[in-house]
Every structure is written in structure tokens, then in C-alpha cells.
């Protein structure tokens, strides 16, 4: 039994935390009535997470509360591809072969969407004139695992989005609203993998994976500090008891080299200069990662000023809801609420 949809519930579920918002509904204009966070670790049960949601929304005795959720399934992918011509891009058989041969993705085993890289809209092979595409998705069983986890916690996702892509849409719209004309480097870093993106004036121009993530740091940290095992290194890494400012560049050297390679090639290829880096997902206590990356690359950290941007999307804040101190990791949650096409339609009228 589902609860009546008198209120809206938006959920961003990563490996690090659950970010959630109760809203006045789902349709724009809407009001954010309350924000809440539930930090995650392997010890948390589904019952504890359900209790968290029950404090945020009224289940009214129902088994589930309807929500809109953003998730980060294992094996997710976002890949940029430029075909030889727009006609070539209309051939779905050809695009399926590209997924397999160039990106090692089997479309038969995954949920795959194709977007127009110029504006993030759904790619329609019948009408589109674009040869620049973004493939995105994840293995179907990975999406199913995310849905099953939410259901165990009492949350029924009537819509489930790939947060990686949702966040890119939010960053693009934010840059448009704030008239940011320089390209933006976006970096998504999680335990097993990372993704590098470069967005320029609403267009995805680079989307490439990094085949390692935070897990690759723990052996190095273990050796540097003489810890007994990688589990101890991981625990220290996520604690608030150690200052990583001095050691950070060494721990992240492998990652910053990947970022330098991508940004350097892009800048030489386009003649443009990247000025800012946006780092999503990471929890607040890993803020030193953003600083280390920005210092290593000589870029500013993009810290979104959320309130005016939300207002421009016709999303208001209830009294007592404060967003000025929220970091970049909340962009994914707020991007679930935004209907960015309405801004474009309004500007074209």
C-alpha cells in the first residue's frame, strides 16, 4: 500500500549518505519544506533508514512512501561520442556496436539512454541532427539493486534517475543562470571508480571514466602511516581526526594526473581555458579532496550559491530551511527537482 502523494519526497542515494527533501509536491512551483541527511555505513539497517524517512514524511500507516530518487548504481557509465556525421548517428545498430566496441558496454544487459550532447535532451534518431551524443546508463541488475534497497527502507521510487547525469544537468543550468562562460571540470569520485566531465555552455564536451576510485588510496595510506591493514586506513580516511592537508597531494597524485591529462588535452584541442572544478557526491569530511584537486590543477572550487538558483527554477524555501552552507554534493538532490527545459522554453518565447 502506498501513501497518498500529498507531499513530495526527493532522495539522493549514494554510498556515502542519503540526502532527502520533503516538498510541497512534485510540480513546479514547489516549496522545500525540510532537508535531512542520513550518513551511511555498512552497519545501518533498513529499519534505521526507514525511521529516518518516517521522521521526514508521514507514511500514514502505509507500507511505502512514493518518491523521486537519484542513484549511483555500480557499473554506471556516461560516455561522450561524436559520430562521423548526423546520418551515421541515426543508425541505432551502428550506435549499439559503438557501445560494445568502443565503450565495452553490452546494451542487452543494461538500461541505456542516449542524449544529445548539445543540450542533454533525449536523442531521437528520427528527427535529431546532432552527431554529438552521450551514452548513459548502468547494468539493469544494478538499477534493480538500488530500487530493492529503497523498497526495503519503505521508499517507492516512482521515478529513478542516474544521479551522475542529473547532477551534470544541474551544473549546466546553474552555469547558464549565473552566466559562467568558461568550461567547467566536473569530477565524480566514489569508492570503486571515478568520472571526469567537462561542460561548456550547457554542452557535455568530455565524459570519460577513471578505472579506480577511493579504494586505490587505502594501500598507500596504510604504507605511509604504518597502519595494520587497509580497513584501518579506510576508517582513518573517513574520520575527522586526521589532517590530510599535507599528505593529500601524494594520496591523490594518481587521480590528479588523470585530471591534468584530460584538462590539458581539452584546452590544447579547443583553445579554451577551464577555470573551475566541481566535485560532487563526496561527504563533507572529505572537503580536503576538493582543495587538493583545485590546488593541483590551479582551478577555483565551484561552490554553488543555491538559493537564487533554486528561486529561478520556481523552487522556494520554507521558513527555517537554510541552503547557504550546503556543499556541492547537494546539487544532485536539487537537480532532481529542477525542470530545466522550462527555463529554455521561457527564454525562447
Image (cartoon, rainbow, N blue to C red):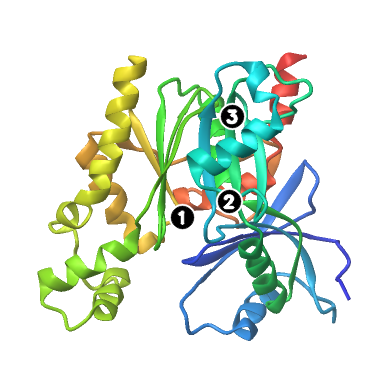
Residue 71 x %, y %: 60, 58
Nearest the eye: 196 or 344: 196
- Name the residue rendered at 48%, 48% in the picture: 324
Of labels 1 and 3, the one closer to you: 3
Q: Are marks 2 and 1 in contact (CB under 8 Å)?
A: yes
Give the Cα distance between marks 2 and 3: 18 Å
Nearest the eye: 162 or 305: 162
Residue 159 x %, y %: 75, 55
The residue labelled by disc 1 is: 281
Residue 87 x %, y %: 67, 17
Please rate how many residues cluster around mark 3, counting C-alpha atoms within 10 Å: few if below 14, some from 14 to 19, many from 20.
many
The residue labelled by disc 2 is: 163
Q: Hey, which quadrant is residue 187 in on the image?
A: top left
Give the Cα distance between marks 1 and 3: 24 Å
Reply above or below: 43 against 334. below
The residue labelled by disc 3 is: 133
Q: Hey, which quadrant is residue 93 in on the image?
A: top right
Q: Secondary structure at mark 3?
A: strand
Q: How many marks?
A: 3
Q: Quadrant of the N terminus?
A: bottom right
- Name the residue rendered at 82%, 79% in the picture: 63
Reply above or below: 147 against 288. below
Give me the disc on residue 10.
none
Q: Are marks 1 and 3 in contact (CB under 8 Å)?
A: no
Q: Is residue 188 visible?
A: no
Amino acid at each position: 500500500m502506498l501513501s497518498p502523494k500529498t507531499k513530495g519526497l526527493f532522495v539522493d542515494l549514494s554510498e556515502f549518505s542519503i540526502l532527502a527533501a520533503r516538498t510541497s509536491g512534485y510540480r513546479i512551483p514547489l516549496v522545500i519544506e525540510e532537508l535531512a541527511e542520513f550518513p551511511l555505513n555498512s552497519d545501518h539497517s533498513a529499519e534505521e533508514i526507514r525511521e529516518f524517512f518516517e521522521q521526514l514524511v508521514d507514511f500514514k500507516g502505509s507500507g511505502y512512501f512514493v518518491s523521486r530518487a537519484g542513484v549511483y548504481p555500480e557499473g554506471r557509465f556516461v560516455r561522450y561520442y561524436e559520430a562521423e556525421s548526423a546520418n551515421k548517428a541515426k543508425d541505432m545498430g551502428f550506435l549499439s556496436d559503438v557501445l560494445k566496441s568502443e565503450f565495452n558496454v553490452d546494451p542487452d544487459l543494461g538500461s541505456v539512454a542516449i542524449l544529445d550532447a548539445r543540450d542533454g535532451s533525449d536523442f531521437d534518431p528520427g528527427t535529431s541532427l546532432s552527431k554529438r551524443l552521450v551514452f548513459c546508463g548502468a547494468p539493469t541488475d544494478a538499477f534493480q539493486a538500488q530500487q530493492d534497497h529503497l523498497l526495503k527502507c519503505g521508499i517507492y521510487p516512482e521515478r529513478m534517475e542516474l544521479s551522475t547525469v542529473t547532477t551534470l544537468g544541474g551544473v549546466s543550468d546553474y552555469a547558464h543562470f549565473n552566466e559562467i562562460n568558461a568550461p567547467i571540470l566536473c569530477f565524480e569520485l566514489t569508492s570503486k571508480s571515478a568520472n571526469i566531465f567537462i561542460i561548456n555552455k550547457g554542452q557535455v564536451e568530455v565524459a570519460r571514466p577513471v578505472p579506480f576510485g577511493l579504494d586505490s588510496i587505502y594501500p598507500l595510506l596504510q604504507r605511509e602511516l604504518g597502519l595494520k591493514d587497509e580497513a584501518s586506513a579506510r576508517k582513518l580516511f573517513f574520520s575527522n581526526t586526521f589532517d590530510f592537508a599535507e599528505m593529500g597531494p601524494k594520496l591523490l597524485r594518481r587521480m590528479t594526473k588523470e585530471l591534468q591529462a584530460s584538462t590539458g588535452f581539452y584546452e590544447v584541442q579547443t583553445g579554451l581555458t577551464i577555470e573551475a572544478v566541481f566535485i560532487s557526491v563526496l561527504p563533507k569530511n572529505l572537503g580536503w579532496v576538493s582543495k587538493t584537486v583545485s590546488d593541483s590543477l590551479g582551478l577555483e572550487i565551484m561552490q554553488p550559491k543555491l538559493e537564487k538558483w533554486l528561486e529561478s527554477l520556481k523552487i522556494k524555501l520554507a521558513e527555517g530551511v537554510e541552503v547557504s552552507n550546503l556543499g556541492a554534493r547537494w546539487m544532485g538532490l536539487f537537480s532532481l527537482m529542477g525542470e530545466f527545459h522550462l527555463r529554455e522554453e521561457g527564454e525562447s518565447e
